[in-house]
Amino acid sequence: MAQIHASDGFETLAIHAGQDPDPLTGAVVPPIYQVSTYKQDGVGGVRGGTHAGVEQGAGRWIEGYEYSRTANPTRGALEECLAALEGGVRALAFASGMAATDCLLRTICRPGDHVLIPHDAYGGTYRLFDKVLAAWGVSYHPVPVSDPAAVRAAVAAYHPKLIWVETPTNPLLSIADIAMLAEIAHSDGGLLAVDNTFASPYLQQPLVLGADAVVHSTTKYLGGHSDVIGGAVVLPDADLAAQLAFLQNSTGSAGGPFDAWLTLRGIKTLSVRMDRHCDNAAQIAQMLARHPKAAQVYYPGLPDHPGHEVAAKQMRGFGGMVSFRHAGGEQAAIEMCARTRLFTLGESLGGVESLIEHPATMTHASVAGSPLAVPPDLVRLSVGIENGDDLVDDVRLALG
Ligand SMILES: Cc1ncc(COP(=O)(O)O)c(C=O)c1O
């Protein structure tokens, strides 16, 4: 039976939660159940069920494995592990972070509802609000989520059903005070959802701080090896989780078993990877803070970052992402991105290998001309777990 105790530490949960040895063979790693359907022992006689349990509509519940869109044992193992790591009652794994975001928003919001979003949110999230959900009557309002007074004013103006935050934000690394925003949302009868992709549950646990939902692009730190696209929602409320599972099953946005297995494999080393990501990012941020060609450095671990104190209060470490504005302007920023040796020019983040990118024309091209537009001279670094000195030298040389 379950090897884990409720009091077990994060590192233990990452390796064991949802991942008991296979009862049939003793395999210490959950098998990849690459299967679409399951034999029933007579009509309705479904087997298993530790990870299953989805309402099919009309009050019909499935308590075991019937069909893999509804439940799959490998995906279930990942979901149980994610729920344990975030301190939630239930997690659901999706085909991508955007699928997770979309499913949560459509579970909570109805036409006529308002949502507050960060004024520097991930471009894909902005695009979902602006180009997709707006057409279905859900309105969004960008606010600086690091400024509680601005959030309070927007809550008074719009009475949002939901406050959506990223913290740290992508790509400007702003910090939102999760406990304070939860209190602000709840005081007006709304909910707080946190996209925890940049921090990972190892560095920050929003549900413990009062948030009502956590979203992940598991593509990033949780997977950790740039080899799988996935997403997750973790909830502290079983009723909301049942509604989310219903919509996920109805719309078919769950991830596949091999993707779940790869993500679980990544999660086992999350803590040690994050420690190294944080150390290497701090080294690079400190070098950049002294470098004349870095006009402004965004890293919450720097003492002069406006969110430093809040980050120190709610995060175990300051993360592996560093952004900065190139003093030479946009062209110098673009040219630098093509000059690194170890940092690979590419989108995404959170993998063991370091990546560099130009947000204005790459990850955040979809916010060009909007209130969320990013500075054209901004460079974003996803600092990997290579040798820290090598990475510092690489950035310094590329800066010229
Ligand atoms: C903060 C954040 N949230 C969500 C997403 C979307 O995740 P995915 O690409 O897995 O759909 C991303 C992707 O970059 C992201 O950076």
Image (cartoon, grey):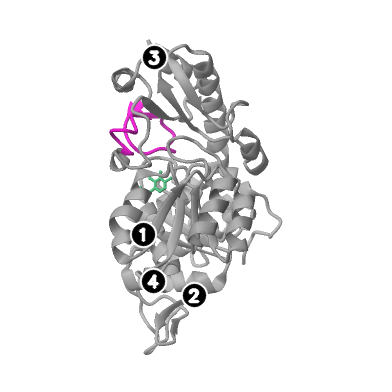
- Which mark is first along the chain, 1 or 4? 4
Measured as percent of width and height from the top left, residue 147 is found at 56, 43
Q: Quadrant of the N terminus?
A: bottom right
Q: Which amino acid is tagged 1?
A: Gly
SS at badge 1: loop
Q: Which-is-in-front pick, marks 2 and 3?
A: 3
CB within 8 Å, label 1 to label 2: no
**Where does label 1 land, which residue?**
255
Q: Which amino acid is tagged 4?
A: Leu
Using the image, determine if residue 288 lies above or below residue 113: above
Give how far apart the Cα atoms at labels 1 and 2 are. 18 Å
How many tags in the picture? 4
**Where does label 2 land, which residue?**
49
Describe residue 27's horizontal placement relative to residue 32 as left or right: right
- Which mark is first along the chain, 4 or 2? 2
- Which mark is first along the chain, 2 or 1? 2
Looking at the picture, tell me which residue is in the foreground, 215 or 14: 215
- Res 16 quadrant in image: bottom right
Q: In percent of the image, x 32 and y 53: which residue is there?
A: 130
Q: Which amino acid is tagged 3?
A: Leu
